[in-house]
Amino acid sequence: MSQKVLLTSKEINIILHRLACQLLENHLDFTDTALIGIQPRGVFLAERLAKILKQEYEVKDIPLGFLDITFFRDDFGRGEILKANTTKMDFLVEDKKVVFIDDVLYTGRSIRAALTAIQSFGRPKSIELLTLIDRRFSRHLPIQPNYRGRQVDAINNEKVKVMWEENDGEDIVYLVSK
């Protein structure tokens, strides 16, 4: 097994600031927009973006939630035992613009599950997708990100591994070959 560095800490930081600027450009003061990190790994990205928007661009109130999609996945109960995460939604999404945030967009199945899960919290006005890594040739469903950090052309036996300082001790993205 070998791994190649796709993004260094510095490159991730640059991408996060670019994504924050794109969000700011499209949502201005976030009065009718909510950021929702997809559990488990999208939470780190969502928290980082919210922090950048608040500290560097002085956006006051950004509704930030975390959505667990475990029980909405189409592979739930098909072999592998999945561990549920915590959903934290202190707001309704009714008539809000929702931005789903996840670290890697691969097959699109996690986002499909998130689209179903979010309905428990109301009917959003619109839903967008922000992802750090877009594995564009691996999609099983017609789902594309509105905001992407980096596009990666990985073949099926390769895996994209995103590591976050908060969880893994460093910010780095690897392309891992089996």
Image: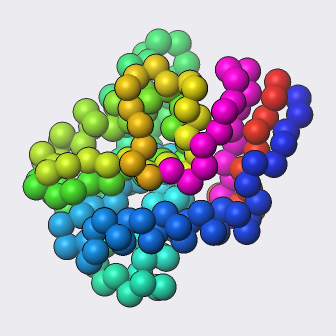
In the rendered image, residue 52, in percent from the top left (x then y), is placed at 49, 76
Quarter location, residue 89: bottom left
Q: Is residue 122 left or right of residue 59?
A: left
Can residue 152 be found in the magenta stretch?
yes
Quarter of the figure with the N terminus: top right
Residue at 54% across, 71% down: 17
Q: Nearer the viewer, residue 37 or 78?
A: 37
In the rendered image, residue 8, in percent from the top left (x then y), is placed at 76, 60
Above or below, comparing residue 107 to residue 89 in the picture: above
In the rendered image, residue 21, in percent from the top left (x then y), is placed at 45, 71
In the rendered image, residue 163, in percent from the top left (x then y), is placed at 69, 52
Can residue 51 be found in the magenta stretch?
no
Q: Is residue 18 left or right of residue 153?
A: left
Q: Is residue 4 visible?
A: yes
Residue at 75% across, 48% down: 6
Q: Is residue 117 left or right of residue 154?
A: left
Quarter location, residue 68: top left
Quarter location, residue 31: bottom left
Residue at 38% across, 26% down: 142
Name of the residue lying farthest toward the top: 78
Tally the marks.
0
Q: How is the image coloured?
A: rainbow
Above or below, comparing residue 20 to residue 135 in the picture: below
Report the magenta residues as a range.
Answer: 148-166
Above or below, comparing residue 23 to residue 105 in the picture: below
Quarter of the figure with the C terminus: top right
Q: Is residue 47 visible?
A: no
Name of the residue lying farthest toward the right: 2
